[in-house]
Image (cartoon, helix red, strand yellow):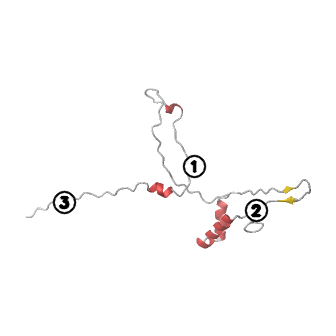
């Protein structure tokens, strides 16, 4: 009779790659900071009454997605006149993409991207835009 020996193979653990989250979020600007601090009576030790001291800060970054939003850009053009001769002048400004339209180049680009790249019909885009109001 042959006795078989049990062979134990140690499990392999992969090392976590450090800095991956920071690398992933490096292209994004921090737009909001939420600070969690002790306030009021919580700032004091319940045993001895001494005020707690900050030892370190733990910073965690998270990616927040905000669906498309609309912003109104107000363009103010000052019109000047000469007090002596009455001649009027206004500074040159950027021409609108579509004359008389409220659409900005970014809005038109977003509509075209949704329509031709993502294949989203204009009627569906209209319903989607209505949800953002």
CA gap, disc 2 to disc 1? 33 Å
- Measured as percent of width and height from the top left, residue 116 is found at 61, 73
Mark 3 sits on what residue? 7
Pointer 2 and pointer 1: residues touching (CB < 8 Å)? no
Instruction: Please identify the residue farthest to the top as the structure is shown.
Output: 48
Q: Position of 84 compared to 68: left or right?
A: right
Residue 85's image quarter?
bottom right
Mark 2 sits on what residue? 93
- The residue shown at (47%, 54%) is 22
- The residue shown at (53%, 58%) is 27
Instruction: Please identify the residue farthest to the right as the structure is shown.
Output: 85
Secondary structure beneath dot 2 equals loop
Image quarter (top left, top right, bottom left or bottom right) of the N terminus: bottom left
Question: Is 108 in front, or is 23?
Answer: 23
Mark 1 sits on what residue? 32
Q: Residues within 10 Å of mark 3 (few under 14, many from 20)?
A: few
Residue 47's image quarter?
top left
Between circles 1 and 3, the one closer to the viewer is 1
Question: Is 20 in front, or is 34?
Answer: 20
Nearest to N terminus: mark 1 or mark 3? 3
Q: Residues within 10 Å of mark 2 (few under 14, many from 20)?
A: few
CA gap, disc 1 to disc 3? 55 Å
């Amino acid at each position: 009779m042959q006795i078989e020996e049990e062979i134990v193979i140690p499990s392999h653990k992969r090392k976590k790659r450090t800095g991956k989250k920071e690398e992933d979020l490096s292209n994004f600007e921090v737009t909001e900071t939420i600070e969690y601090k002790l306030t009021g009576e919580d700032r004091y030790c319940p045993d001895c009454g001494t005020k707690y001291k900050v030892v370190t800060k733990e910073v965690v970054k998270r990616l927040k997605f905000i669906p498309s939003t609309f912003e109104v850009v107000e363009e103010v053009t000052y019109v000047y006149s000469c007090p002596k001769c009455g001649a009027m002048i206004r500074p040159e400004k950027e021409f609108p993409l579509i004359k008389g339209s409220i659409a900005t180049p970014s809005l038109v680009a977003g509509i075209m991207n949704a329509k031709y790249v993502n294949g989203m019909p204009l009627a569906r885009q209209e319903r989607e835009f209505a949800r953002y109001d």
